[in-house]
Image (cartoon, grey):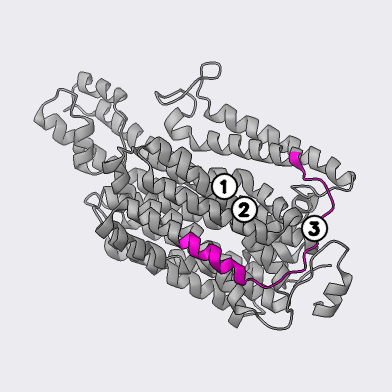
Amino acid sequence: MHTSTSVQAAQPAGTARPANAGRFLVLPILVLILAQMGATGDNGALSLATSALTSELGATTAQIQLANMIYPLVGGAFMIAGGLAGTIVGWKRTFRGGILLCAVGEVVLAAAPSMAVFIWGGRVLVGLGASFMIPAVLGLIPLMYQGGNRTVAFGAIGAASGLSALLPLVLGVVMETAGMHATFLALAGYFALVFAASFTLPAIEQPHERTAFDSGGVVLAALGLFLLLIGVSSVSSWGLVTPLAGAPFTVLGISPALPLAAIGLVVLGLLVVYERRVEARGGIAVLPSVFLATPQVRAGLIACALTFFFMGAQSILMAPYLQLVAGWSPVAVGSISLVTGLPTFAFALGIPKFLPHASPRRVIQLGYVAMAAALGLMALSVTTEGASAPFVFLGAFMAGVGAGTVSSHASNVVAAALPEREASQSGGIQSTMRNVGQAFGVALLGAVLLFGITGTVRSQAAADASITPEVASQLDAVSIDLGSDRTFEDEIAGITMSDAERTELVKIEAGARVDAVRIAYAVGAVIVLAGLASTPAIKERPHTARA
């Protein structure tokens, strides 16, 4: 392990030196935690606003899914650029610019007259703000902390997800008493306070890089990630192969979802080739080759992605189901976030603080198992009548244990395997992987959910002898969203049928709803467990930094 003196002495020219290496700086980490909490709290507010969006802005399940998706979609597309911007123009400037964009975005969300403005105005602005703010949070840590202090600081940022559980609880009260619009205005005020607090950050020695901004890499990264994520996220509304009514166009007669995703992958492949040439010319690449070439870095990035994939699973499955089907209030749903948040905070901060010699590999492996167990408990919580509260809260608690355990080491696993400059720049890559993971969680499991409900209802109705073929065939034109029995009755109100047929269809849909949600949870658990395959690349003992 390097001492603080040897690390600083060995740093190459143009990299920043960690400030105050000997003692842990409390106030700066609190400011960074508040920023991280704001980003997480915004997603929590959106989950709590599900019912209000449906009633006030006429949102469909697909639109709510897109609203959940657009934040990680935009953030994922531009966070690599945010990481490079921080390296070139300074992390503090990048941090403050991102906070201001988030504040403006929350104001737009509060004033949005339609879902189109809500999604493409407010959510896009908040996503852009996060694409600069969050990489700066992770980029500032290697500059302000070193050695064991750095491990604790990264753990504290992971713990911020746990502290963020307090926000949905508070926002749930605001939403019930003052409404959705006041809630998003409150978040705007929160970001304004964080902006003011950012001026308390200590002076940091970060010489500006004398190099051109990698505009070509930024364009390729943003375009590739955007096409990939918009393609994946639109499967449920555009169709997998056969185009649905919501598809804006077709590609050779098929849904554009998969072709767009495939084009995105091709663009990202071109990005890798392009970035090698940038590095060969001595420039700073937006995606340094060391990120792809180092197995431990890849394993850490997968851990970042799977933690937020898991959170995406919760946002598209648990919160909408409890509000739209089980009829839970925003405050009740907010209380679940507290049950998740407390263990997240305790494990993310406690493991590096009280178990400094624990194997990062074993810690992350245990976290994956705990997250998969949480998804299993959440699947058991789903009933045809609503939800089993004991299983809901037990699953929420295990979710916090798993997410906190993985978060305690994920970021440091990445930074520990990189030279100083790349360790600081890794904030953008880590944040991108988090958003890609969340986007895939929302998109994939949302598609499993909606396709599962619709497909099961149509197939079982066609096979049911008590339902006439005429009624069953008309279900092909019905868009079936996640909702209560009453919601489904409203969706099929335009079909002429007998009372007995209506009762049978409602029964079929209730069973299909439960099965689809449980299958989606199971798919999520399998994907989380698949992350275990990457963990052998994580070294048993972390290095504090590499010069």
Q: According to the image, label 2 marks what residue?
A: 132
Q: Position of residue 125 (x, y in %)?
A: 52, 45
* Range of magenta residues: 190-215
* C-beta proximity under 8 Å, tags 2 and 3: no
Residue type at numbered disc 3: His
Q: Which residue is nearer to you in this view: 315 or 526?
A: 315
For the point 80% across and 78% down, which residue is it?
Answer: 4
Q: Which residue is nearer to you in this view: 384 or 414?
A: 414
What is the C-alpha distance between the residues marked 2 and 3?
17 Å
Q: Which label's residue is closer to the chain start, 2 or 3?
A: 2
Q: For the N terminus, which image quadrant?
A: bottom right
Task: Determine the secondary structure under disc 1.
Answer: helix
* C-beta proximity under 8 Å, tags 1 and 2: yes
Q: Position of residue 14 (x, y in %)?
A: 85, 61
Q: Residue 52, can we see it?
A: yes
Foreground: disc 1 or disc 3: 3
Q: Position of residue 344 (x, y in %)?
A: 48, 69
What is the C-alpha distance between the residues marked 1 and 2?
7 Å
User: From the viewer's perspective, is 453 left or right of 495?
Assistant: right
Foreground: disc 2 or disc 3: 3
Q: Which residue is nearer to you in this view: 143 or 323?
A: 143
Q: Which residue is nearer to you in this view: 492 or 249?
A: 249
218 within the magenta span: no
For the point 59% across and 72% down, which residue is it?
Answer: 29
Q: Which label's residue is closer to the chain start, 1 or 3?
A: 1
Q: Which corner quadrant of the image does residue 304 belong to? A: bottom right
Q: According to the image, label 3 marks what residue?
A: 208
Task: Determine the secondary structure under disc 3.
Answer: loop
User: From the viewer's perspective, is 506 left or right of 357?
Assistant: left
Residue type at numbered disc 2: Phe
Q: According to the image, label 1 marks what residue?
A: 128
Residue type at numbered disc 1: Leu
